[in-house]
Amino acid sequence: MKFNAKLFLLFFVSFGFLLGNTIDNLKIYTEEYPPYNYFNQNKNKVEGIYVEIVEYILKDNNSKLSGKDIQLVPWARAYRSALTEKNTAIFALTWTEERDSLFKWVGPVTNTSQVLIAKKNRGIKITKVEDINKYNIGVVRDDVAEQILINSGIDSKKIQQAHSPVLCARMLEAGRIDLWAYGEGPARFIMRTDFGGFDNYEVVHILREGEMYIGFHKDTSDEIVNMFRKSLEKLKTVDIDKYNAILKKYL
């Protein structure tokens, strides 16, 4: 039989594409967003609600990947990677209308509430969105709370970006910002674990209530996305006790 170099090359390229299109080649990014995902220094590993759920999904699909392969990086880097790198997953990603066409979505996994937090002794009152422009607001760069503020018409000069939520909390504590825009659950967790509690702070305004998902680069194969979708559905139905146990462990 005559060797057909073109046919061999086509087979090789196609086979390589299939190998690169499997769940084991997925890059998974997250950020410091406790209790959903964060680095536990005592255990020297990434953990949290979404970490355990993603670990369940990977195991359910017999993947070689595990929690050790989840990369915890600043949110802006994780977000950009999920927008620009194929076969990339990101969590926990809040769904918004503006983001809808940018990713493929698996979930919802949990609910979320984006809020404005202030020191109680400031006595700040927000009765309408326009009131927010009176104050300096700290945000994590590219976080959904920042996007909500911008889309609400808040003056960009009033928004101060930080690369991490802990830095935002420090800025609020030091009086360098008046308000911190962030997810209520993670903000309370950070204040409780790193700043002695939430008693001296209060939620002064709810920006938006919504749902969080696992997001994928829009060119990630539907096969991989459906693997995640089916396993998540299994966790929330067949293995509902395990799902509830994960939530109870961290909340």
Image (cartoon, helix red, strand yellow):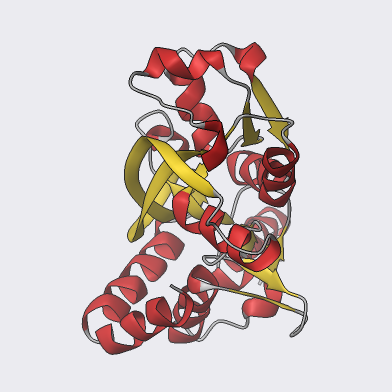
Residue 151 horizontal/vertical position (percent): 44, 19
Residue 30 shows in the view: yes
Q: Quadrant of the C terminus?
A: bottom left
Residue 94 horizontal/vertical position (percent): 43, 46
**Label tally:** 0
Q: Quadrant of the N terminus?
A: bottom right
Q: Quadrant of residue 241?
A: bottom left
Q: Quadrant of residue 22?
A: bottom right
Q: Residue at x 76, y 83 (%)?
A: 42
Q: Residue at x 54, y 70 (%)?
A: 23
Q: Foreground: 2 or 19?
A: 19
Q: Quadrant of residue 15?
A: bottom right
Q: Residue at x 32, y 43 (%)?
A: 209
Q: On the picture, is 65 further left or further right than 103?
A: right
Residue 119 shows in the view: no
Compared with 90, 61 (above or below) is: below
